Image (cartoon, helix red, strand yellow):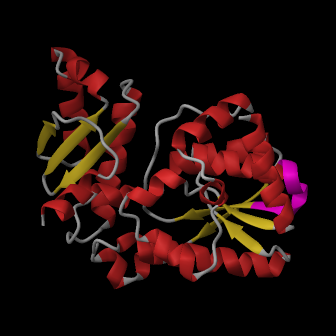
Amino acid sequence: MDRSYDLLKNLIRQMGGVVVAFSGGVDSALLLGAAVEALGQRALAVTGLSPTYPEAELNRARDLAKAMGARHLAISTEEFEQPAYRANPPNRCYFCKKDLFQRLREIGLREGLQFVIDGSNVDDLGDFRPGQEAAKELGVRSPFVELGLGKSEIRRLAKEIGLPNWDRPSQACLASRIPYGEEITLDKLNRVERSEKALQALGFEQLRVRDHGPLARIELSPDDLDHALLSEARKQIIQECKSAGYTYVCLDLEGYRSGAMNEALTRN
C-alpha cells in the first residue's frame, strides 16, 4: 500500500499544480493529503456550497483541510438555480458537477493551477454516475481511476497515513434522498437534513432518510435495524422525523445501500 501512495503522489506531482474537488469525505481527503505532500501550496482544496450540502459537512471539511495544512476555499455553486436541476431528472448530478467543475477550472486559471482533480475511484465506474460525464467534458482528472484504486484500497491508505475519517461512512448530497422526477425544494432538503442530523445524534452512523412526500423512508446499516426497532429507539426516531416535518415514518428492511434511488431506474 505504501507503493500505491507513492504512485499517487508522483502522479499528482507531475501535474505541477492542482485544484482538488474537496467534499471532506475519505476519497477527497486522501487525494488532498497526497496533493499537499506532493505540491505543497500548489495544491488548493475547494468545497462547493449549496443547499444540498449539509453545514456539518462543511465544518468537517474546513477542520480537516486545516489539520492537513492545505489551502482551502469554500465557494457557492448555483446548480440549484437551474430549473433542469431542480426538476430532478436521472442525470441530475450532471448539472451539479458541471457547475462545480466549471468554477474549479476558473479558480485554477486564476491561481495558475493547471489541473482539476476529483476523488472518483474504479468502484464508481460500475455505478450510474452522470457527474462523470461532466468531469470528462471539462477535463477533470481522477487519479484513483488512473491508478486503478477502489474504495477499499483508499480506506486502507487513508488509515495508514492517519486520516481521522478513514472509516467514516460515505456521504452524498441531500438531493440524492429525493426520488427522480420529484422537484427538489428547500423544504424537502431541510427536513431530510434535520432528520438525519437527529438520527446521527441518536448514535446511528450509516443512514439515509429518503424523502417520499409526507413519508420518511429510513435506511440504516443492517447491524442497526434490531436496535432501531427497540421501543425507546423507535419512539425517538418517530419523534425526530415528525418534528422535522414528516407525517409518516417507516424503516426500510433492506437497510442502507448506496444509490438506492437508482433501483427505480433499473426496474423501469
Query: Can the viewer see residue 59 in this picture?
Result: no
| Residue 115 falls left or right of residue 142 | right
**Magenta residue span:** 37-44
| Secondary structure predominantly adopted by residues drawn in magenta | helix
Q: Is residue 154 above or below residue 17?
A: above
- Residue 7 coordinates in the image, percent (x, y): 78, 49
Magenta span includes 130: no
User: Residue at 46% across / 70% down in the picture?
Assistant: 131
User: Residue at 66% across / 54% down in the picture?
Assistant: 147
Quadrant hosting residue 74: bottom right
Q: Is residue 203 above or below residue 211?
A: above
Quadrant hosting residue 77: bottom right
| Residue 182 falls left or right of residue 31 | left
| Residue 76 falls left or right of residue 190 | right
User: Residue at 55% across / 82% down in the picture?
Assistant: 137
Quadrant hosting residue 44: bottom right
